[in-house]
Image (cartoon, coloured by chain):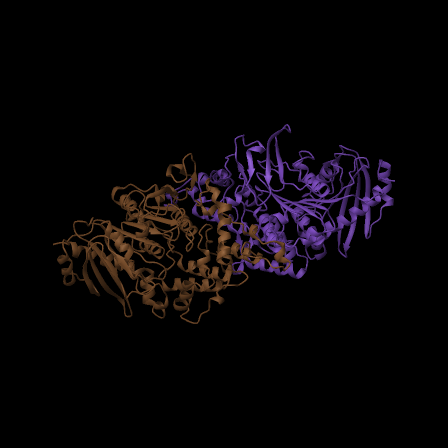
Chain colours: A brown, B purple
Amino acid sequence: MGLKSSDDCHALASKVHFPNTTVLDVSFVPAGTNLTFPNNHPTCLQSQVSTVDVCRVQLLRETGPASNVSLEAWLPMQDTWTGRFLGLGNGGLGGCIKYNDLSYGSKYGFATIGTNNGHDGNQGESFYKNPGVWEDYVYRAVHLEAETGKSLVDQAYGMPHTRSYYLGCSTGGRQGFKEAQLFPGDFDGIVAGAPAFDLLALIYSTGNGYKILGPKGSPTWLSPEQWELVYADINRQCDGLDGARDGIIEDPSLCQYRPEQLLCGDAAAAGNHVDTSNCITPAQAASIRALFADVHGTNGTFIYPRLQPGANGTAGIFNGSPPKYPVDFFRYVLYANPGWDISTLSPLDMDAARVFDRSSGLDTATFQGDLSAARDAGVKILHWHGLADDQISSENSARYYNHVARTMNAPVAELDEFYRYFRVSGTGHCRGGPGAQMVGGNLETDAGYAEGNVLASVVRWVEEGIPPEHILGKKLNAKGEVVMQRRHCKYPTRNVYKGPGPVEEADSWQCV
Amino acid sequence: MGLKSSDDCHALASKVHFPNTTVLDVSFVPAGTNLTFPNNHPTCLQSQVSTVDVCRVQLLRETGPASNVSLEAWLPMQDTWTGRFLGLGNGGLGGCIKYNDLSYGSKYGFATIGTNNGHDGNQGESFYKNPGVWEDYVYRAVHLEAETGKSLVDQAYGMPHTRSYYLGCSTGGRQGFKEAQLFPGDFDGIVAGAPAFDLLALIYSTGNGYKILGPKGSPTWLSPEQWELVYADINRQCDGLDGARDGIIEDPSLCQYRPEQLLCGDAAAAGNHVDTSNCITPAQAASIRALFADVHGTNGTFIYPRLQPGANGTAGIFNGSPPKYPVDFFRYVLYANPGWDISTLSPLDMDAARVFDRSSGLDTATFQGDLSAARDAGVKILHWHGLADDQISSENSARYYNHVARTMNAPVAELDEFYRYFRVSGTGHCRGGPGAQMVGGNLETDAGYAEGNVLASVVRWVEEGIPPEHILGKKLNAKGEVVMQRRHCKYPTRNVYKGPGPVEEADSWQCV
């Protein structure tokens, strides 16, 4: 009984059974193995090192006449298994089993399972004339992951899991909220990072950004060098708002960036040659203003929040080529027309996207403000967002939190009981950035399963009833030493420097 | 020769001549006279005390087959006249000679002239099927005021004026910019406060605010008591952003107010009786969010900036009755339909207003970004706006400044040569408020013609070439003693408390 050896692992191949599911492979993977995935889609990971001994189980579950979901579990051996179950999310339009997070979850004793979300690769062509694949993506893959994963735990260890958790970021963040909204029985604790909820508005908004800046070389487009000027100017105008000029903007929502100071000035207007590598034109200033403004549609309706100043990836995202997610969505999902041209994008396309989402009944938006079912089921939701996220504005996370507050008529103290949102400064899209960004939202931000780790925090909340008051983020140097710590504040509080210590010390800051 | 006695004054009656103009009355008014205006429209001033001996000249100038403009000059006696000429603006939809500002201008030796702007009263019925009256209002009255006033000075004093100035606020601010944009030869120096430019968007936006909150008693409407809660909560969230909790928000554009903390909470949702005098409902929270958000129209176009948090007059403006300016404009100007109902207001009405403004050729918007003609004519423009203005958001003044910067491709240093915008904290619509609001924009904010007085500042700029770097505002107690001074910063800099002195001292603050 149980999963104590590689033999126990191999034996699972013939032992485990699930409805409509093929067991593709079962293998024992010793700690430190460098697994390679030569058949993986090029947009997905090609290799991953395992951190502990695991039993690797690969499944394929049919979800319809022309759709199926790949599932992969990494099960720690019985003696390192904590009894906990962990389901993983995805990213972008993927399509990729997150082997890094399988490694991360199993490292800390979770029986961990991931999915390809119904298709392979971070691309949207798979949705073309196949609504079943879209349905897998919107909600079904992760729900089946929970169902199948829990059953696998039962069958593999010979005992049920104790508690179930979910970890995801970006599309994975949206999937986490979809679970909370639709299947509150699936997970006891949910870590949702940088959620891509209100997804179609996000996709439209990215396309709209491309329309604002135009193709590479347009008068409204900025070169990477010019974006560097803008980034520096944003810091100059807004870094001090939190009381410390440390290169990290603690509350970008306070930053009302004014690009006009970078104007080249008169000479350009007079038609003289001006070296615009050190300044910008009026048309470019107008583009920047439009990018940092909320997006609106027909009849003045709000669509999506602005980009957040201080998320310095704009040059990469708007590099002058049509952005892939809106192109793929409008071509392969909404219009089923591979010839659709993004230069035609207008607010009418957003209206069409809303009609599609309503009529599909799937609620891709995943923006339900009523979380009472999750609350009543005892689910704890830890929502976090990097404040230097250049792909998904954290202002949309605050918007959701406030939407929930209004929908549930709940001041902060009431939401605190089951739902908390943390703003993680100096942190990019799910990972990276100049701040104390190591918060354990994934393998890349793992600085140990201890205080400040979001996964450990939600476990403590669920199992000990001790909710996180803040997220203690760490910044490491190349040697892995901690060079900065900062307590990321629970929304709606914001972080201010109070001194007298250096900015690198958490105690120098205060959530107000 | 000249204007040395009351006899000289009375002699003007038969001496002065202007094209298409009737001299209605000429009278000598000794200092300290309490003039009453029993025939004035009830929305206009009914009395005014003169501050110095003046020769009062009342004129009526025809402007078309069914329109005319009342003009009134208060001319100081020759020995107190500085040689300067001052033209005045109006307010709202008025229609009122500003006797207070005639008293103010003449007090400091300006030959001062005002106008009724082509019709009597702060109301729009006079525009009904009479485009000539609208044309007077949009630009013609003030231009004729300049033309007629300068001629009157010539004829009365027997010598031309030395320099010409303009002073106005609200609609008067818009009129000042109209002069700068259309008749840059009229005035050497312009003081434009709280300009009502982009006028039709402002009017639409006020109507939109009424639509958001609804009539008195609607579930979306807030009582005055609830607004008091909101004002206090705004201060709690935003007053500290400038470094000092002194009840004055130095930069409201930084304030992203979150009303949800005032939600009543669960009990209300469960249908139990909740005393909402100490809290708000979700519907009200949504109203507040919409009011403090920029207004957008068809196709997602920007219409007008949000109300500014900290301008605590919202309860009065949205008291549950249809606001007069949008009602009058849409009824009597745009649609010539006295039965038009504001409950039908939609973004389509804004589109119609834009078409009207374009086709009229008058440019009521007065939002031209090219001020090069004024610059080239040597005009100096001092633009100021109260940051606690509850009627016109100062964010629209910043928006105009930035629009000029982009249109003229001019960084701050270039605009500084002829156009400066100052943000005056703790100050309401043209006057009043808890801050150092005495800046001399009108008689009510007159704390002496010295440093910090906007009129004195523009004179110094024009005549001595010394531009204002800031506006030193004063706050007086009931005895007229100065209890606070603050240097209001030139945009885009903002005021921060640096200490170590008390907040009441100007040196405790810094423009950054």
Is B11 or B195 nearer to us in this picture? B195
Q: Is residue B194 left or right of residue A94?
A: right
Which quadrant of the rendered structure holds the C terminus of chain B?
top right
Q: Measured from the top left, where is residue A209 in percent x and y?
A: 48, 59
Rendered position, B454 above or below B365 = above
Is B333 or B465 nearer to us in this picture? B465
Is residue A186 visible to us here? no
Q: Is residue B62 left or right of residue A75?
A: right
Quadrant of the rendered structure where residue A505 is? top left
Is residue A66 visible to us here? yes
Residue most extreme to the front: A479
Is B158 or B100 nearer to us in this picture? B158
**Residue under the point 14% across and 55% down:** A5
Which quadrant of the rendered structure holds the N terminus of chain B?
top right
Q: Is residue A283 left or right of residue B113?
A: left
Residue most extreme to the left: A1
Q: Measured from the top left, where is residue B93 in percent x and y?
A: 66, 49
Quadrant of the rendered structure where residue A11 is? bottom left
Q: Measured from the top left, where is residue B145 in percent x and y?
A: 75, 48
Q: Measured from the top left, where is residue A193 in percent x and y?
A: 35, 51
Is A125 or A244 nearer to us in this picture? A244
Say how many tags the image has. Answer: 0
Q: Is residue A82 left or right of residue A399?
A: left
**Residue under the point 41% across and 54% down:** A392
